[in-house]
Amino acid sequence: MIRVDVTRKTYGTTQVLGRIAFEIQRGETVAILGPSGIGKSTLLRLVAGIDPQFEGRIDRPDKMAIVFQEPTLLLWRSVLQNLTLIHPTLSDDGARAMLDKVGIANKSGLFPGQLSLGQQRRLSLARAFAGAPEFLIMDEPFVSLDAKTAEVMLTLTEALIAEVRPATLFVTHARPEAERLRARVLELRGSPASLAPRLVSGLEKP
Ligand code: ADP
Ligand code: MG
């Protein structure tokens, strides 16, 4: 369903990514694991179509949602409008139901700046899932949250993935997050980065 075949990505004269090829099936979750600076966000931007400057080919569905590392919210619009403006077919009631699912229904009239970081992350999650995406891309969605909030977010994400069943690609430097979401793990290594040979583990499909 999603087919990634990147052969090369450079910034100026520096090659960041080498050959990286993988597929993601409908309903499957894939985690890209690797240390900071290796090229995870770069790869996600290619897969998402945000950065068209690379060699290779990527096939993906149009119905896609992205959760960025930092919540990219409309700061001058209410929490509710952050959903309805992005999803024009979503009613106010539909948006409220979505906010309820992530536990911030009582914040619908506030501005994003009036939310805690954890609540802003919940809003980004609600925004991503509100369009029932076929393909969900997340860049370190649980980073820089305290352990308890990260756990709440993981539980929420797990439930929303189970409900909407998108193909999911997410980036993390924390293996426990990948295990928690029962993801197939692809590990980036080296410079330029490529996929490490697949290890057989309990997480892999037979
Ligand atoms: P990660 O997400 O794994 O931490 P990134 O994909 O953000 O890594 O970055 C990979 C490498 O590419 C880093 O060395 C970074 O400095 C470099 N890089 C990222 N974006 C750009 C850019 N727009 N221009 C030049 N270099 C960049
Ligand atoms: Mg990154």
Image (cartoon, helix red, strand yellow):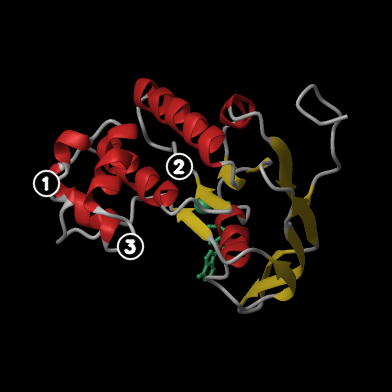
Q: Nearer the viewer, residue 140 or 78?
A: 78
Mark on residue 110? Answer: 1
- Which quarter of the figure has residue 10? bottom right
Q: Earlier in the sequence, mark 2 or mark 3?
A: 3
Q: Which part of the image, by quadrant, shows the N terminus? A: bottom right
Ligand 1 placement by image quarter: bottom right
Q: Marks 1 and 2, Cα distance to the nearest angstrom?
A: 22 Å
Q: Nearer the viewer, mark 1 or mark 3?
A: 3
CA neighbours of label 2 inside 10 A, class few (<14), some (14 to 19), many (20+): many
5 with respect to 181 (left or right) = right
Q: Label 3: which residue?
A: 86
* Up-down relation of residue 93 to residue 90 (above or below): above
Q: Nearer the viewer, mark 1 or mark 2?
A: 1
Q: Position of residue 81 (x, y in %)?
A: 21, 57
Q: Residue at x 24, y 42 (%)?
A: 96
Mark on residue 141? Answer: 2
Q: Which part of the image, by quadrant, shows the C terminus? A: top right
What is the three-letter code of the residue carrying label 2? Pro
* Tag 1 near tag 2, CB within 8 Å: no
Tag 2, which secondary structure? loop
Q: Residue at x 58, y 62 (%)?
A: 42
